[in-house]
Image (tube, grey):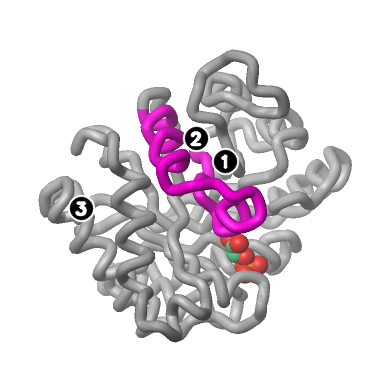
């Protein structure tokens, strides 16, 4: 199965509107058509309008970093799926470990967010991953399975087709200590098997599953060339347009290798 790969940048709480705009200019100056992959940038909410205009009619797609599960109402400080749709988002990150750990978001809440996004034809990038102590206690699969199954709990197989999963071991995020490509492939294969038991083999083999956690231009190829890894979710290295472009180029190189070319 040939899945379109994804190189996604998660800017977290970085870049003002002016900084985002300067980034887009620098990125687009060196951008070309890439084979077999989608480039996604997830800036803070405030930068979405300016980036929507700058990335209009380019191959770069926009994503947001969070959403509320209700579509409107008395939820001070929250943003809804139709609001993000209006801003030109195609993707929305949900269940990032920083949301789960700093803001105490539960897997149940994440499941409702995923459901709402799918009903607005926005693709969730559902993040799952274990902490260091959970890994050391041999609980990686258990933790990932719980986050995954609760995250997709309300989806029909048809809705699941637009899902993207990001496996991000918490101990690898922002630490410069990435997983090995082999360990990531093993967990990601497990995720695909779980998706197959939930939604059937055919749907599961079309769902994109990314790796995230200290991805850099130097290691991205070794991850994406793995059979089940369909791209990366990149934090720190996506903040620099030159580095992120290199990650995109390396993702294309992995695509060409996987599809039997160079
Ligand atoms: P990192 O972050 O690339 O800086 O490790 C990844 C993420 O949090 O999505």
Q: Where in the figure is residue 154, as x and y percent of width and height?
A: 29, 35
Point 28% across, 73% down: residue = 227
Picture coordinates of residue 52 (x, y %)? 66, 31
Q: Residue 161: name its quadrant.
A: top left
Q: Which mark is residue 90?
A: 2
Name the side, left or right, on which 44 lies relative to 88.
right
Q: Is residue 188 above or below residue 182?
A: above
Give the mark toward the camera: 3 or 2: 3
Earlier in the chain: of badge 2 and badge 1, it is 1
- Which quarter holds ligand 1? bottom right
> Percent position (x, y) of residue 7?
51, 58
Predominant secondary structure, magenta span: helix
Per the image, the residue denoted by label 1 is 63
Q: CA distance from mark 3 to mark 2?
A: 20 Å
How far is the residue under mark 1 from the one under mark 3? 22 Å
Q: Residue at x 65, y 28 (%)?
A: 78
Q: Earlier in the sequence, mark 1 or mark 3?
A: 1
Describe residue 238's horizontal placement relative to residue 198 as left or right. right
The disc at residue 219 is none
């Amino acid at each position: 199965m040939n899945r379109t790969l994804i190189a996604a940048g998660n800017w977290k709480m970085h870049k003002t509107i002016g900084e985002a705009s300067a980034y887009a200019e620098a990125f687009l100056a060196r951008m070309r058509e890439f084979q077999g992959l989608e480039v996604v940038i997830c800036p803070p909410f405030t930068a979405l309008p300016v980036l929507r205009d700058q990335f209009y009619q380019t191959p770069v797609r926009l994503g947001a970093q969070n959403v509320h599960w209700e579509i409107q109402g008395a939820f001070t400080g929250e943003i809804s799926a139709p609001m993000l749709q209006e801003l030109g988002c195609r993707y929305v990150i949900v269940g990032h470990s920083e949301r789960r750990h700093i803001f105490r978001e539960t897997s149940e809440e994440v499941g409702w967010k995923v459901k709402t996004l799918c009903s607005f034809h926005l693709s969730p990038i559902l993040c799952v991953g274990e902490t260091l102590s959970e890994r050391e206690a041999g609980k990686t699969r258990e933790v990932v399975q719980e986050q995954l199954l609760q995250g997709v709990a309300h989806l029909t197989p048809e809705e699941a087709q637009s899902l993207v999963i990001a496996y991000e071991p918490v101990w690898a995020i922002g630490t410069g200590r990435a997983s090995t490509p082999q360990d990531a492939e093993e967990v990601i294969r497990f995720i695909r098997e779980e998706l197959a038991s939930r939604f059937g083999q055919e749907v599961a083999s079309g769902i994109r599953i990314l790796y995230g956690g200290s991805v850099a231009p130097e290691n991205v190829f070794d991850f994406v060339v793995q059979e089940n890894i369909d791209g990366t979710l990149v934090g720190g290295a996506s903040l620099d347009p030159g580095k992120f472009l290199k990650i995109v180029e390396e993702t294309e190189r992995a695509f060409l290798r996987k599809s039997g070319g160079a």
